[in-house]
Amino acid sequence: PRPRRPAGRMGGWTASAIAASVTLFLVAGVCEVGGGWLVWQACREGKPWWWALIGSCGLILYGFVPCAQPIADFGRLYAAYGGFFVALSVAWAKVFDGFKPDAGDFIGCAIALIGVGVILFYPRPGGGVEPGASAVFPKLANET
């Protein structure tokens, strides 16, 4: 095995770990926001009951997606996901509900996503990615 590089400025993150993490945040967002939207549609907008069933399945799947993240700390992972959730919620509403975001929505999303960057990439002892933390992608955090 090659020697591991020091954490450095990116807290030990590699390009493939970043790509996997962002993809998983997006998948989690689609499961949560999409699932919640389908339940909302069934309960509040009169759509068929099976929309709520499909939405509930998406919400259940959402609970498992974060387990694939290369981040071992639950609190840090969910805090970072919160920023993605803010932006994805606005985007979903724009695409599927005709919501018209205003400057405040865009500024709020930008602040939330900047917060994601700070949470994930702040230089801390041990870096931001924990080797072997992902139940699905354990080698992503071990790249050198």
Image (tube, grey):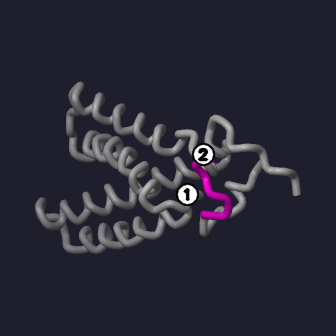
Q: Which amino acid does label 1 sit on?
A: Ile
Q: In the picture provided, is 120 more to the left or to the right than 108?
A: right
Q: In the picture provided, is 69 more to the left or to the right than 14?
A: left
Part of the protein shown in magenta? 127-133
Which residue was labeled with disc 1? 71
Residue at 67%, 47% (x, y): give it.
Answer: 16
Q: In which quarter of the image is the N terminus?
A: bottom right
Give the CA distance from mark 1 to mark 2: 11 Å
Q: In the picture provided, is 13 more to the left or to the right than 26?
A: right
Residue at 68%, 43% (x, y): give it.
Answer: 7
- Dominant SS of magenta comes to loop
Q: In the picture provided, is 13 more to the left or to the right than 99?
A: right
Q: Which of 1 and 26 is in front in this view?
A: 1
Given contact means CB atoms under 8 Å apart, are the residues at marks 1 and 2 in contact?
no
Label 2 sits on a secondary structure element that is: helix
Q: Which of marks 1 and 2 is nearer the N terminus?
A: 2
Which residue was labeled with disc 2? 18
